Image (cartoon, grey):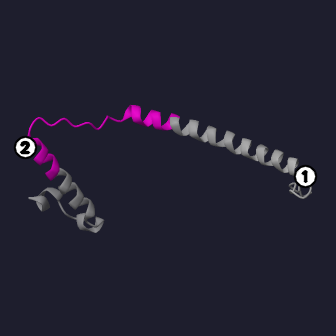
Amino acid sequence: MVRQEPTTADNPEAVEQFVALVAGRIDASMQKVIAQTEEKISAVTEVLPSGRIELNNQNQQEKLIQLFILLRTLMALPPAYFQNRTLICEIL
């Protein structure tokens, strides 16, 4: 049996009720998804450190920038590059 949704030609009030019903169901589903997502994100952020790095001087900042540049360079290399190689020897 196929259910037919009301059309504006049949009954405009029925269409409004149908739209309100669908919107209510969508809203309830979205609220549920949002609540679940917030719970999961809260759980993850509680476990992870804040990411705040305190630097005491310019030298530490320069070393940290060098580290980030090195990591970016290493991540850009293809995985085949690291096969049968010792990473420390390559860097030095």
Residue drawn at x 67%, y 42% as measured from the top left: 27
Q: Which residue is mark 2?
A: 59
Q: Which residue is mark 1?
A: 11
The residue nearer to you, when weighing 61 against 83, is 61
The residue nearer to you, when weighing 83 against 90, is 90
N-terminal label among 2 and 1: 1
- Residue range in magenta is 39-66
Residue drawn at x 7%, y 43% as measured from the top left: 59
The residue nearer to you, when weighing 91 against 56, is 56
Q: Position of residue 4 (x, y in %)?
A: 88, 57
**In the image, 83: left or right of 30?**
left
Neighbours of disc 1 within 10 Å: few (<14), some (14-19), many (20+) = few
**In the image, 45: left or right of 70?**
right
Report, in whole angstroms, how far the alpha carbon at label 2 lies from the one at label 1: 75 Å
57 falls in the magenta region: yes
- Rendered view: 83 above or below 36: below
Neighbours of disc 2 within 10 Å: few (<14), some (14-19), many (20+) = few
Residue drawn at x 16%, y 50% as measured from the top left: 65
Q: Amino acid at mark 1?
A: Asn
Q: Position of residue 88 (x, y in %)?
A: 14, 56
Q: Which quadrant does the N terminus fall into?
A: bottom right
Q: Position of residue 25 (x, y in %)?
A: 73, 43
**In the image, 60: left or right of 30?**
left
Residue drawn at x 21%, y 61% as measured from the top left: 73
31 falls in the magenta region: no
Q: For mark 1, give the secondary structure.
A: loop
Q: For mark 2, give the secondary structure.
A: helix
Q: Which quadrant does the C terminus fall into?
A: bottom left
